């Protein structure tokens, strides 16, 4: 695991050091304090937690936990009290209680949230109000909406939508999901059609209303929304490019502004903001 310092003025990276990971990890994230690293191994069927030093360098794993098939994402709840891990090949999400002081993980009750077979849960996001969770399923392109009980860390399904564009033909292969900072719009990428679907979000019920889809970079594995909620950027694993879209504040519609070459097989992109 490589660590870099970011120059806030230039954006340039300075190498700080490297730390060990428990396996080849498909996804990494930090806890809300930035003191621990969560990682998920797709091929190794495990998740792990590592401490992060004051110098930003990752230390050895504190816990390595076997999971169901194909652990994919491993993310904390907004209050840092729970952590959840998608298992794409086992159609479940593991649920853990998290001690942010010690970095210890213990199974929650229930210890797993099941979804229908052959959905393939991949990535998920919390609504900014903390009351809802949105899950994109790779194998079906289903978008599942859950109400979230923050006191118990439990999920309850309330709706199923789809990230597939109208008239889709082929094998679904959904990838990423994000919600705008104001919680009004949600977007999901689908790789077979190379499209991004848009939805309006009801802040009271959490339910989604589809508003259409747009073509994007070929095989859009990752995309991101800027902290202001005005821009969306998507990268194409097979186009070797990145497109920047303006998000319409009234409708959530996407309008392409510019495209850029970014090198071979980009699959993830992030905005970094500084105080």
Image (spheres, grey):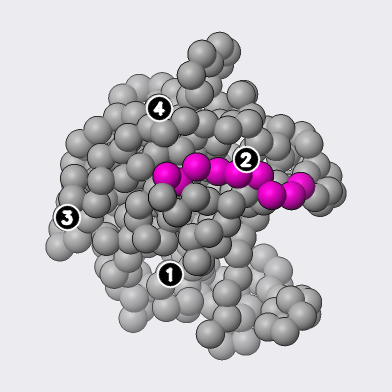
Q: CA distance from mark 4 to mark 2?
A: 17 Å
> Are the two marked residues, 1 and 4, in contact with CB atoms closer than 8 angstroms?
no
User: From where the camera sits, is residue 212 visible?
Assistant: yes
Q: CA distance from mark 1 to mark 3?
A: 19 Å
Q: From the viewer's perspective, is residue 55 above or below residue 249?
A: below
- Give the crowd class for mark 4: few <14, some 14-19, many >=20 residues within 10 Å: some
Q: Secondary structure at mark 4?
A: strand
Q: Quadrant of residue 135?
A: top left
Q: CA distance from mark 3 to mark 4?
A: 24 Å
> Are the two marked residues, 1 and 3, in contact with CB atoms closer than 8 angstroms?
no
Pointer 3: what residue?
A: 149
First in residue order: circle 4 vs circle 2: 4
Residue at image location 62% in from the left, 87% down from the top: 55
First in residue order: circle 3 vs circle 4: 3
Pointer 1: what residue?
A: 31
| Residue 86 picture location, percent across and down | 41, 43
The residue sitting at the front extreme is 250
| Residue 123 picture location, percent across and down | 46, 44
Q: In front: 112, or 185?
A: 185
């Amino acid at each position: 695991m490589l660590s870099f310092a970011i120059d806030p003025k230039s954006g340039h990276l300075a190498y700080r050091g490297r730390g060990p990971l428990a396996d080849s990890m498909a996804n990494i994230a930090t806890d809300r304090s930035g003191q621990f690293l969560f990682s998920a191994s797709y091929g190794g069927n495990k998740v792990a937690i590592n401490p992060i030093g004051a110098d930003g360098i990752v230390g050895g794993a504190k816990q390595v936990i076997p999971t169901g098939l194909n652990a994919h994402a491993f993310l904390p709840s907004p209050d840092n009290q729970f952590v959840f891990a998608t298992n794409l090949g086992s159609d479940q999400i593991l649920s853990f209680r998290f001690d942010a002081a010690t970095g210890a993980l213990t199974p929650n009750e229930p210890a797993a949230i099941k979804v229908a077979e052959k959905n393939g849960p991949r990535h998920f996001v919390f609504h900014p109000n903390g009351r809802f969770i949105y899950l994109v399923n790779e194998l079906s392109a289903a978008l599942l909406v859950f109400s979230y009980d923050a006191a118990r860390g439990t999920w309850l399904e309330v709706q199923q939508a789809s990230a597939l564009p109208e008239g889709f033909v082929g094998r679904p292969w959904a990838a990423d999901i994000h919600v705008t900072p104001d919680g009004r719009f949600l977007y999901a990428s689908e790789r077979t059609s190379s499209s991004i679907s848009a939805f309006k979000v009801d802040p009271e019920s959490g339910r989604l209303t589809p508003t259409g889809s747009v073509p994007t970079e070929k095989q859009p594995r990752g995309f991101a929304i800027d902290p202001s909620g005005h821009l969306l950027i998507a990268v194409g694993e097979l186009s070797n490019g990145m497109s920047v879209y303006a998000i319409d504040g009234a409708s959530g519609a996407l309008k392409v502004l510019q495209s850029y070459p970014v090198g071979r097989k980009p699959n993830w992109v992030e905005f970094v903001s500084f105080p």
